[in-house]
């Protein structure tokens, strides 16, 4: 399984590949130069239950930390995860 980061075109996203097949993604948009909104997460139904959503959230969180960004979550899944743990308090706006 491979994690990729795409910042081309209209969206910014991290996505997971399994032998070149895209199996999950998490997308974010810049609200301003220091704030991103994580607005979409999706995992292929055949790959659910493997904590891949959490892996994608961790990728965005690491990106935010490395770039000194804060994050909001309009994606319901990410908002739920943010609400259940203090692990991401350092990036939550």
Image (tube, rainbow, N blue to C red):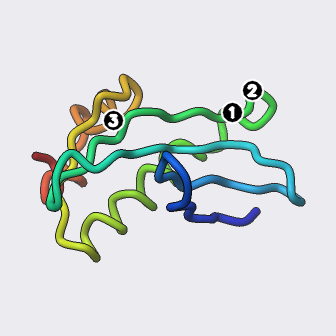
Q: Residue at x 24, y 42 (%)?
A: 85
Q: Where is residue 47 in the image (x, y as percent from the top left)?
A: 75, 37
| Dot 1: element | loop
| Dot 3: element | helix
Residue that label 1 marks = 48
Q: Between disc 3 and disc 2, whose residue precedes?
A: 2
| Dot 2: element | helix
Q: Where is residue 33 in the image (x, y as percent from the top left)?
A: 17, 60
- Bin the neighbour count of mark 3 within 10 Å (Cα to Cα): few under 14, some 14-19, many 20 and up: some
For this view, does 78 lie left or right of residue 6? left
- Bin the neighbour count of mark 2 within 10 Å (Cα to Cα): few under 14, some 14-19, many 20 and up: few
Q: Which residue is drawn at 60% across and 46% down?
A: 52
Q: Position of residue 5 (x, y in %)?
A: 56, 64
Residue that label 2 marks = 45
Labels 1 and 2 touching (C-beta < 8 A): yes
For this view, does 7 lie left or right of residue 91? right
For this view, does 73 lie left or right of residue 6? left
Residue that label 3 marks = 81
Q: Residue 6 carries which label?
A: none
Quadrant in which residue 69 is drawn: bottom left
Residue placed most toward the observer, 27 or 58:
27
Labels 3 and 2 touching (C-beta < 8 A): no
């Amino acid at each position: 399984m491979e994690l990729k980061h795409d910042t081309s075109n209209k969206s910014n996203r991290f996505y997971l590949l399994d032998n070149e097949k895209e199996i999950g993604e998490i997308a974010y948009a810049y609200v301003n130069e220091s704030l991103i909104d994580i607005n979409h997460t999706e995992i292929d139904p055949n790959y659910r239950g493997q904590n891949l959503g959490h892996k994608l959230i961790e990728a965005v969180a690491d990106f935010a930390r490395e770039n000194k960004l804060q994050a909001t979550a309009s994606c319901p899944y990410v908002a739920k995860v943010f609400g259940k743990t203090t692990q991401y308090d350092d990036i939550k706006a």
